[in-house]
Image (tube, rainbow, N blue to C red):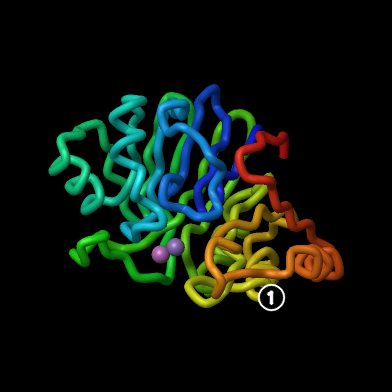
Amino acid sequence: MKVTHYGHACFSVKAGGKHLLFDPYIKENPAAPDMDLNTLKPDVILVSHGHFDHILDAVEIAKNSKAQVIANFEICQWFHQQGYQNCQPLNVGGTYKADWGTVRGFQAVHGSSFPDGSYAGIAQGFIVETDEGTFYYSGDTAATYDLKMIGERYKLDFAILPIGDIFTMGIDDAIMVSGFIQCDRILGVHYDTWAPITIDKEQAKKKFAKAGKELILLEPGVEKDI
Ligand code: NI
Ligand code: MN
């Protein structure tokens, strides 16, 4: 599957014949590639929770591209309030069956409020199944034993986990979670955006390799087959 990391927790995956964009936060992201949001034409935008660093560009890109948004009920209401109706609600534990694949909402242990401080529902991650493969994006979360359910139920081709620590799990916990979800190929996100979540990338890769796992860190804005 072709994957592009746009910095922080924003990335896209081409799967099931669709362009899926996750957690758009590009314009105000100090670590994002210099790019025009209008060039992004996703078919689907998935939003894990309401924090600014996952949602700030979501409405603009949705309006530009007319993409279908998939997010929890409260986030869909928020899109409606801003004049965007094409939002499919999907809450924790639910599975949405699209014509290109399925998306399951999975609980994340994390807060969720909109940039104005109002309630944004429960933070979640997504398990995406398509004919081309299956992947899991955890969203912002801590490591929890709940994640073992994913390993027991799905055969993941890769997973996208935060590794920057402080606001989410860090590198050591991501290695542990990789065991819980039974997936040895991890794309790291949510690091290096600001000073508190700066990581040593080479050391992180070495730690994963020592545990028999692969940590993939992509250059922002460059598409890669993973
Ligand atoms: Ni967050
Ligand atoms: Mn975040």
User: In the picture provided, is 151 more to the left or to the right than 18?
Assistant: right
Quadrant of the drawing holding the N terminus: top right
Q: Position of residue 108 (x, y in %)?
A: 43, 65
The one nearer the camera, 64 or 66, is 64
**Residue located beneath label 1 in the image:** 172
Give the quadrant of ligand 2.
Answer: bottom left
User: In the picture provided, is 146 more to the left or to the right than 4?
Assistant: left
Q: Position of residue 173 (x, y in %)?
A: 64, 74
Res 145 visible: no
Q: How many marks?
A: 1
The one nearer the camera, 21 or 115, is 115
- State whether label 1 is within 8 Å of ligand 2: no
Say which residue appears at 55% left-offset and 27% top-offset: 16
User: In the picture provided, is 172 more to the left or to the right than 55?
Assistant: right
User: In the picture provided, is 84 more to the left or to the right than 125?
Assistant: left
Query: Is disc 1 surrounded by few (<14), some (14 to 19) or many (20+) residues within 10 Å?
Result: some
Q: Position of residue 188 (x, y in %)?
A: 64, 57
Say which residue appears at 47% left-offset and 50% top-offset: 126
Say which residue appears at 79% left-offset and 61% top-offset: 213
Up/down of 195 relative to 32, above or below: below
Q: Disc 1 on helix, strand or loop? A: helix
Q: Position of residue 95 (x, y in %)?
A: 39, 45
Up/down of 65 relative to 184, above or below: above
The image quarter in which residue 129 lies? top right
Res 132 visible: yes
The amino acid on which the numbered mark 1 sits, given as a three-letter code, is Asp
The image quarter in which residue 183 lies? bottom right
Say which residue appears at 57% left-offset and 74% top-offset: 165
Quadrant of the drawing holding the C terminus: top right
